[in-house]
Amino acid sequence: MVSREMALEVEALREQLEEYNYQYHVLDDPSVPDAEYDRCLRRLLTLEAADSSLLRADSPTQRVGASPLSHFQSVSHEVPMLSLENAFDNQDMVEFNRRILSRLGEEAGSLEYACEPKLDGIAVSLLYVDGVLERGATRGDGRSGEDISQNVRTIPSVPLRLRGSGFPPVLEVRGEIYLPKEGFERLNELARAAGEKPFVNPRNAAAGSLRQLDPRVTATRPLEMCCYSVGLVKGGELPERHVEILQKLKEWGLRINSQMQVVNGIEACDAYYESLAVKRDALPYDIDGIVFKVNILALQERLGWVSRAPRWAIARKFPAQEEMTELVNVEFQVGRTGAITPVARLKPVFVGGVTVSNATLHNSDEIERLGACIGDTVVIRRAGDVIPKVVSVVTSKRPGDAEAIIFPRRCPVCNSEVEREADEAIYRCLGGLVCAAQRKAAIRHFASRRAMDIEGLGDKLVDQLVDEGLLESVAGLYTLKRESLLDLERMGSKSVDNLLAALERSKHTTLPRFIFALGIREVGEATALNLANHFGNWEALVAASESELLKVDDIGPIVADHLRQFFDSRTSMDVVTGLREAGLQWPNLAVQSAEGLPLAGQTWVVTGKLESMGRSDAKAHLQALGAKVAGSVSANTSKIVAGPGAGSKLARATQLGIEVIDEAALIALLNREGVSL
Ligand code: 5U1
């Protein structure tokens, strides 16, 4: 017999868990760490296990209750799930608006449009009867789809029971199930680690996850649901405007898109499209366009629909991020550290808004995984500023004369031996500075803006200087003769003077820049800054033992080893001597003790995109205030600064109950501490 107290506690726990879920998944504003959620869930599981009469299908414990299916049942959509007409430019939008205005006649004027991103996921329908999730189904052909209720129930942003009151007794909600970018990366990292084939893109991963017959597999996939309309509605009243309906869905516990806006007139639709095009890459999910809908339902009804698409809505597409093209050849590039990267030479193809003719193939493991051959038709993906990559091979289109890709046994530039380090997917040329490719890359890095900032020393000039035998190492830059520079292509006397002046200016540098400019493996700007602050001068740094190096913030055994190798190398240190003899100088730094500084003793983590200052500046400012800045979140982390796109680090911090601040709060703190930005 269940006691009244037990029944009340079960009810209270369910309500509490639903509230936590709502805050986390719908409002994006969790109020408690994950540990508290888990504690309540465990307590509820214990109580329900003690007496099965307490169990209910809509309990938060019942998300993964069901056993695997043998197949999915077919379900018919009483109200068909429509698709959308596409617009590819603003002219198509103007036409769309004109058609609507002419159908509606005079009274329409400047129409109200609801605008929101079109998520690149899988369209689904959720059926709620008396507020309880009865069924989840795929769109299928729009008239009938598959019953994926078991899988849909595992998605935390799908409420098993609607919140509040006032929802129609029968309410079918429609939307997109998708994998956020971060979840997709995590899933693929796990797949790679397990030696499995990674997913090609987030959409395929979401589709594959929903197609699982075993809901326990779906439950491991970080899927989310975002709602954009209603289908079948019986009983009850819904508001008169589309966005008001969506606001209601949000009140009832369903996730809607936070970018949604109502605008007046078609020009404003164009402005919305352009503003989202700029934001597109920073959004935590993939979108393939913007959906515009006539906002007033009475007008939607008057407009009706034609051949499965409503006349009152349209999707204006962004340029495709994936296209097919031919893999014409594979070349091997040697980088600054000798890493050999296969680069796909492609038949030019327009993708993601630009013409792409090269794409990275990463390493030999990736070529093997793709199973690519020269002559293959391949799928290229270019999202935002990301380097285009080959994501898959269309094997059905393989020509009879396709050729295998053979990784070179010797360096394609200097013919030195090539080595594959244990646990590394990368082959490296062992030629060091003997290899012209490594020398060129080292010089380019040395001259780059964040290193020695030598204006006028472009890539083409570096190529010429090395190829003509005028430059053996970065030290040689400072002994270049005016006459030999004048002999080079595109080098008039003005360019030569400018370059010589830039070289002269660069001699007055800072210790962190100098350390960074040397291009020591794994020593980026932040590490160079840590080293400079810790040791204060070059001599102390060079004399530091491996164990002393390990005391520096963020330096582990691998970086310490690379540093020692550099300092122990005769060739490297000869280059440094050459640079100092040429007059390179920097002020020594006071060795900083964090003691007494405002953030002394604190460990911070910076993650996501920081719009105005960038992560490396944020780190440098925090370190200047005495904080340690770590690369990963642990129980020792004091605070985390999270910008848009923050993923697993933010999730872990939330789980551990660590305080999270955004860039604005960081700037406010830096201002309070008198840091000039
Ligand atoms: N954001 C959004 N995506 N999407 C897809 N709204 C939207 N509306 C759709 C579809 C297929 O269809 C309407 C006709 C409800």
Image (tube, helix red, strand yellow):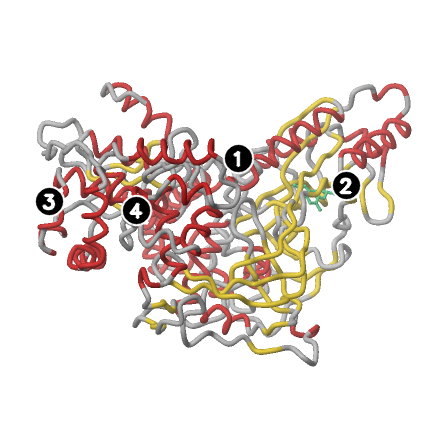
Give 159 or 527, whichever is nearer the viewer: 527
Give the amino acid type for the residue marked by disc 3 in the picture: Glu
Q: Which residue is mark 4?
A: 524
Q: Which residue is mark 2?
A: 87
* Of callouts 3 and 1, the N-terminal one: 1
Does residue 330 appear in the picture of this structure? Answer: yes
Select label 1 or label 2 by which is in front.
2
Mark 4 → mark 1, Cα distance in angstroms: 52 Å
- The answer to whether residue 479 is above or below residue 509 is below
Q: Residues within 10 Å of mark 1 (few under 14, many from 20)?
A: few
Q: Which residue is mark 1?
A: 164
Give the amino acid type for the residue marked by disc 1 in the picture: Gly
- Give the structural element (helix, strand or loop) at label 3: helix
Give the amino acid type for the residue marked by disc 4 in the picture: Gly
Give 201 or 390, whichever is nearer the viewer: 390
Residue 311 position within the rendered picture, expressed as x and y whole percent measured from the top left? 83, 38
